Image: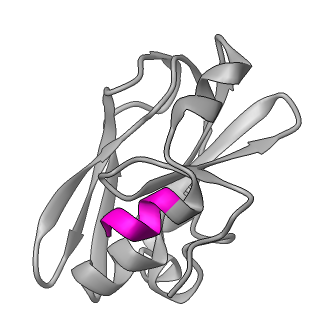
Amino acid sequence: MASKTDRTYLESHEWHKVEGDLVVIGISQHAVDELSDITFIEYAKESGSISAGDTFGEIESVKATSELYCGIDGEVVEVNNELVDSPQTVNDDPWDAGWMIKVKPSNPDQVKSLLSAEDYDAKS
């Protein structure tokens, strides 16, 4: 399955999508397929500064628990708390309704250094 080309990616399966002056972050369909039924999402950080490579939470499924990583430096300005009560939303719609955090980037160009959809798909 091809990943969406309007985003950039980390090898750890998080997508980053620029929306105005924010970057929205979630996980790819590939990650959802690997995890299978997602049962729990917890945010380690709900606001404040974050750096590329930092974890912002974890996601659990019937198969595994995985940390969630941010690929850019900036400030977390919003989290999708609906996922805490309804983690299955990520299974149903990881690209849109299943977004996890929004970050105001310190350097908006930093997102361009992440993997393109084509490069991500080649590694996944």
Residue under the image location 19 percent in, 58 percent down: 66
Quarter-of-image position of residue 54: top left
Residue under the image location 41 percent in, 23 percent down: 52
Which percent across, then down, holds residue 22?
76, 33
Q: Residue furthest right?
A: 20
In this rendering, is residue 60 above or below 92?
A: above
User: Magenta region's main secondary structure?
Assistant: helix
In this rendering, is residue 18 above or below 107?
A: below
Which percent across, then down, holds residue 11?
33, 51
92 or 81: nearer the viewer: 92
Which percent across, then down, holds residue 63?
11, 82
Looking at the rendering, the stretch of residues picked out in magenta corresponds to 119-124
Which percent across, then down, holds residue 7?
66, 54
Q: Indicate the colouring scheme.
A: one colour
Decide if residue 77 is in sight here: no
Say left or right for 4 vs 40: right
In this rendering, is residue 119 above or below 121?
A: above
Quarter-of-image position of residue 113: top right
Decide if residue 91 is in sight here: yes
Say left or right for 6 vs 16: right
